[in-house]
Amino acid sequence: QVQLVESGGGLVQAGGSLRLSCAASGRTFSSYAMGWFRQAPGKEREVVAAISRSGGSTYYAGSVKGRFTISRDNAKNAMYLQMNTVKPEDTAVYYCAASSGSSYSISEPWYDYWGQGTQVTVSS
């Protein structure tokens, strides 16, 4: 079992940058594929990015590709989302998620554990 805690959210102006962190408990962080999801007001939760257990494979939603970077540090039991050139439409609650599956997925049911979320607000 793993517990996830997100941090780094806040208010940022359009065009700015923000770095989200996801801290994981437990000793087996490297055995989990990880993902970042977000949910904007009135919208369904959607995948933002995902990363394999080793960090060698990544996925990005089309809306963030080229602006966001997902990474992980298995030695520190942590995952990150570097958000650059943010836009007002990036405003959402951002969640990190962990999957004990063999690889990452863009599907929510694939993930077993979820953090509580961190609010990101981008002002225009």
Image (cartoon, rainbow, N blue to C red):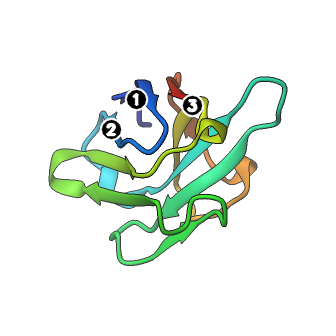
Dot 3 amino acid type: Ser
Q: Earlier in the sequence, mark 2 or mark 1?
A: 1
Residue 102 visible within the image = no
What percent of the width, then of the height, locates residue 44?
82, 36
Mark 3 vs mark 1: in front: 3
Residue of label 2: 21
- Residue type at mark 2 is Ser
Report the residue at 44% width, 37% height from top. 1
Q: Of the residues shown, which amino acid type is indicated by label 1?
A: Glu
Q: Nearer the viewer, residue 52 or 123?
A: 123
Residue drawn at (31%, 35%) of the image: 23
Do residues under tags 3 and 1 come within 8 Å of each other at their CB atoms? no
Which residue occupies 60% across, 44% down? 37
Query: Which of the two discs, 3 and 1, labels the residue nearer the N terminus?
Result: 1
Mark 2 touches mark 1? (CB < 8 Å): yes
Q: Tell me where residue 66 appears, x and y as whole percent.
A: 48, 68
CA–CA distance in space, label 3 to label 1: 24 Å
Crowding near the residue tagged with mark 1, few <14, some 14–19, many ≥20 C-alpha atoms within 10 Å = many
Badge 2 crowding class, 10 Å Cα cut-off, few under 14, some 14 to 19, many 20 or more, is many
Q: Which mark is residue 37?
A: none
Q: Which mark, residue 124?
A: 3
For disc 1, the marked residue is: 6
Is 34 displayed left or right of 87 in the figure? left
Look at the numbered disc 2 and give the secondary structure of its residue: strand
**Residue lying furthest front:** 124
The image position of residue 27, as x and y in percent, is 24, 44
Crowding at label 3, few (<14), some or many (≥20) Cα neighbours within 10 Å? Answer: few
